[in-house]
Each structure stands twice: as C-alpha cells, then as structure tokens.
Image: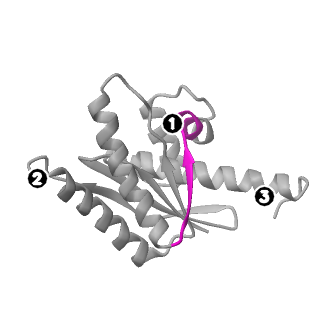
Amino acid sequence: MLIMGIDPGIAISGYGLVNNKNYKNTVIEYGVLRTNSGISMPKRLEYIFNGYMELIRKYSPEAIAVEELFFNKNAKTIITVGQARGAALLAASLMNIEVFEYTPLQVKQAVVGYGRAEKIQIQEMTRILLNLKELPKPDDAADALAVALCHINSFRLQSVINNNGERS
C-alpha cells in the first residue's frame, strides 16, 4: 500500500510517500513544494496543484492522507493554508484517489503515542519508524511523512477491527 502524506501550506507544502508492505514501511520520496511570496495567490495555488498532480502521476499512491487545519489566531494564515489544502484535495479527487484526513492530535497520537508531543519527538519517531539515518528535513516534509504513517496505522487498526481481531 503506497500512501502519500501531505502537510499543506501556501509557502511550503510538505509531501511524503511511504510504502507499507508486509508490515514494513519504506520511504519512497519526500520533500516540499515551495512557492514564492512575490507571485499572485492564484499562481501559487496553481504551482501547488500541478506539483501534487505530477507526484500523483509519477507514483500512483493508493490513498492520500492530509493533515486537517489547526486553527490559530491568525485568520489570514488559516485561509491561505486552507486554499493550499484545497489544491491538494482537488488533485487527489481528479485522479480518483481516496483522501483521508487527520487532525494534528491524531497524527501525534499515531506516531508518538502522545497527542501533545513536541515537533522534535514527532520527527525522531518518524525517523525511527521509517528507519532513516537522519531526521527528515525540512519540517514540512517530516510532518507529511508522519501523516502518511498515521494513515498506515489507522488503516491497519481498521483492518484488524473489520476482521474481528485477526491480522490481515
């Protein structure tokens, strides 16, 4: 099962592709899509959308896991991140790939086991769980890998529940 995790953002949007086979997770690729603040919002969104379309075409993930928005006090930030998130969701929908959404709390719980984990704890557990030599960088890419791991863990748990406790 190949999962694309996405940590949406307008300036930096992280992505991570993780393959789960026989209960082993392997990183296929991770990185970020960066946009220039000097160009118009529509052009930034177009770049993000096209970047995700290219990644989806190249890797054909079976599912896409996207981090839900965490509301903070800056309404402008939440709106622009929401627009970038929309570009990622649209790309997935146009390619007929099922999207799963997870809150930051769910991601932390799935990766670290503690919903209030610090960023460095998430990065270190992501590194360990994916058998990486170094912490994945930049932070947005590490977060995207964590979102992919969250989906893999959630999917595995749901499979066990659906099979009455038997591993599939």
Q: Position of residue 65 (x, y in %)?
A: 53, 55
| Amino acid bearing label 1 | Pro
For the residue pair 79 and 142, the one nearer the viewer reads as: 79
Within 10 Å of disc 1 (Cα), the crowding (few <14, some 14-19, many 20+) is many
| Amino acid bearing label 3 | Ser
Q: Please give the name of the residue rendered at 83% of the width and 60% of the height, measured from the top-left corner.
A: 167
Of all residues, the one furthest to the left in this rendering is 38
Within 10 Å of disc 3 (Cα), the crowding (few <14, some 14-19, many 20+) is some
Is residue 68 visible to us here? yes
In this picture, residue 142 sits left or right of residue 131: left
- Please tell me the numbered disc located at residue 13: none
| Amino acid bearing label 2 | Ile
Secondary structure category for the residue under label 1: helix
- Whichever of callouts 3 and 1 sits on the residue coming sooner in the sequence is 1
Residue named by callout 2: 39
Q: Position of residue 3 (x, y in %)?
A: 54, 63
Is residue 136 visible to us here? no
- Whichever of callouts 2 and 1 sits on the residue coming sooner in the sequence is 2
Residue named by callout 3: 159
- Pointers 3 and 2 in contact (C-beta within 8 Å): no
Residue named by callout 1: 104
Secondary structure category for the residue under label 2: loop
Q: Please give the name of the residue rendered at 59% of the width and 48% of the height, measured from the top-left corner.
A: 150
Q: 164 above or below 105?
A: below
In this picture, residue 100 sits left or right of residue 92: right
For the residue pair 23 and 13, the one nearer the viewer reads as: 13
Secondary structure category for the residue under label 3: helix
Q: Which range is magenta?
A: 96-108
Q: CA distance from mark 2 to mark 1?
A: 29 Å
Q: How is the image coloured?
A: one colour
Write down the quadrant of residue 59 in the picture. Answer: bottom left
